[in-house]
Amino acid sequence: MAELHISSDKIIHNIETLNAFLEKWDIQWSLVVKILSGHKNFLDLLLFHPIVKRLHSVADSRLMGLKKIKEINPDIVTMFVRPPVIDNIKNTVRYADISLNSSIKTIEALDIEAGIQGKIHRVIIMIELGELREGIMRENIIEFYQRVFDLKNIRIEGIGTNLGCMYGVQPTYDKLLQLSLYKQLIEAKFNTHFPLISGGSSITLPLVGKPSMPKDINHLRIGETVFMGTSPFDNKRFKNLHTDAFEYLCNVIELEIKDSAPDGVLSEGNIGHTAPNASTPNKNYRAILDFGILDVDVHELKAKNPRVKFVGTTSDMSVYDFGPASNSKKCRYKVGDKVHFIPSYMAVARLMNSKYIAKKILK
């Protein structure tokens, strides 16, 4: 079985490093663990670590993930980083202490359910700043907040925005300044105060401590940089974080010298996906590995050996080229060997979500 190796020490180091950096600039943050897909063994290790207890909250985009967090450590403050579904309001209030919202109908439903459960549910209201994902329109802000302030079982934790996740709109100074000004407008209008301006996700990190970050931005929601060590702003290593906390190991289940071009009449009925140069005619070592597109997008994997080249994939097997066949030079691999890959953030997320991929936690 293919395996995903997880280095716990490297991830903890990344959390500690980021927390020290953000504390220096008086910024709170939520650790977004959706990449883990509720993996119990790793959450057991993570949720009782002293550094995690110092964070503002632990967040997920799946209620089942938040349920697992509360089952493991009920004292952890949880945040639901996807607008709740009306049909799942009961579980949202049960497992999420805080949720991100952009629908007044949903917040009203949360208010009713929070009353039933005897809770105060906290919300961060998301503002649309150009990414065209979740967020209320700016011209509706005053009316929206007026209705939320009238609810008895809802507490406004703050104002927030999402940038960079769909269209890649960058979190510039102007965008974040708008968020800060809206908070000031609402607080002045309603003679109130709420603690957080949530200025985005990992993509905002490179702005921290620079003039391009308004001083009022005091909260971030960070997942990718913690686990991958890079910023999606430029895909470069952030600070001195580890970028190799995950490694994907796959098994060679067949190794033969084969033509690199298929033989026969090709149709549109295939279910596979091939590399653009898969039809170049020659004889190469071809290996079949024990994973397919049901497990992960092969384009999100990078072989550690640069000579290993992707050829094609189907639902549960993938083919890789190990180089030209030669009588004078044998292939370094054999059946039963493992091929090592560096997975991207999305690759890790899909592999963690697959019950057919083994997960091994390393120190």
Image: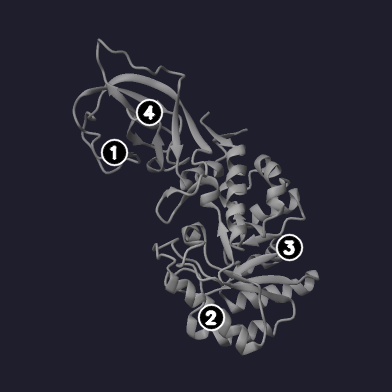
Question: Gap in Å between the C-alphas at discs 3 and 4?
Answer: 47 Å
Query: In the rendering, at what x and y percent does residue 337 appear?
Result: 45, 20
Characterize the local packing of mark 2: few (<14), some (14-19) or many (20 or more) Cα atoms within 10 angstroms.
some
Instruction: Give the residue at mark 4.
Output: 305
Q: Quadrant of residue 307?
A: top left
Say which label, 4 or 2, has the lower sequence index: 2
Question: Gap in Å between the C-alphas at discs 4 and 1?
Answer: 18 Å
Instruction: Give the residue at mark 3.
Output: 94
Dot 3 falls on a residue whose secondary structure is helix
Where is the C terminus found, in terms of image quarters? top right
Question: Gap in Å between the C-alphas at discs 3 and 2?
Answer: 30 Å
Q: Quadrant of residue 44?
A: top right
Characterize the local packing of mark 1: few (<14), some (14-19) or many (20 or more) Cα atoms within 10 angstroms.
few
Amino acid carrying label 4: it is: Asn
Farthest residue in the left direction? 281
Instruction: Give the residue at mark 2.
Output: 182
Amino acid carrying label 2: it is: Tyr
Instruction: Give the residue at mark 1.
Output: 275
Of tags 3 and 4, the one toward the viewer is 4
Judge whether 189 appears above or below 88 on screen: below
Please tell me which residue is depicted at 70% across the width and 76% down the height of the picture.
Answer: 154
Please tell me which residue is depicted at 34% across the width and 39% down the height of the picture.
Answer: 272
Of tags 4 and 2, the one toward the viewer is 2
Judge whether 297 appears above or below 20 on screen: above
> Are circles 3 and 2 on residues that touch, CB within 8 Å?
no
